């Protein structure tokens, strides 16, 4: 097997660092959304907030465009994250009703 060029190794290290940062950021985001879920359950609010989600999609599409990221990809990614958050909020609400 041939040796990996130094530039490729450097780029891969950068990608690994970015991946680690993304995981840490997602963990922090989910810690915050867990608190939101608890508050929503306590206040008997619904797990999903379509108006807020719509605002977030519009805001993140603009951020994606400004950053040179495909806004369709950004929207799909956000939809995936929001679906998981809603699932957590539903579980929290169910647990508080028991």
Image (tube, grey):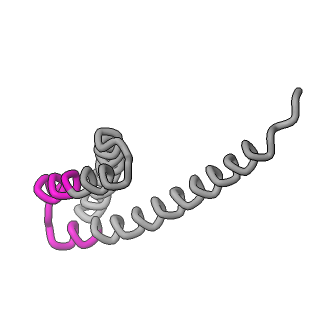
* Numbered marks: total: 0
- The quarter holding residue 76 reads top left
Range drawn in magenta: 38-58
Q: Quadrant of residue 52?
A: bottom left
Taking depth in this image into account, of 79 and 11 the one nearest to the observer is: 11
| Quarter placement of the C terminus | bottom left
Answer above or below: position of 91 versus 9.
below
Residue 94 pos. (x, y %): 26, 56
Question: Could you tell me which residue is drawn at 24 percent across and 72 percent down?
Answer: 39
**Which residue lies at the image location 22% right of the left edge and 58% below the top edge?**
59
Q: Nearer the viewer, residue 87 or 96?
A: 87
Q: Residue at x 31, y 61 (%)?
A: 92
Residue 82's x, y, as percent?
30, 51
On the rendered structure, is 5 left or right of 77?
A: right
Image coords of residue 57 (percent x, y): 22, 51
Q: Is residue 87 visible?
A: no
Considering depth in this image, is 19 or 37 the residue closer to the camera?
Answer: 19
37, 63: nearer the viewer = 63
Check the picture and name the quadrant holding the N terminus.
Answer: top right
* Residue 77: % across, % down: 36, 45
Q: Residue at x 63, y 57 (%)?
A: 17
Is 17 displayed left or right of 78 in the figure? Answer: right
């Amino acid at each position: 097997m041939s040796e990996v060029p130094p530039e490729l190794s450097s780029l891969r290290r950068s990608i690994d660092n970015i991946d680690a940062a993304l995981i840490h950021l997602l963990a922090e985001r989910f810690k915050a959304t867990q608190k939101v879920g608890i508050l929503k359950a306590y206040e008997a609010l619904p797990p999903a907030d379509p108006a807020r989600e719509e605002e977030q999609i519009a805001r993140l599409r603009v951020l994606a465009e400004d950053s040179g990221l495909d806004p369709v990809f950004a929207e799909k990614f956000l939809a995936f994250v929001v679906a998981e958050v809603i699932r957590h909020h539903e579980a929290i609400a169910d647990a508080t009703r028991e």
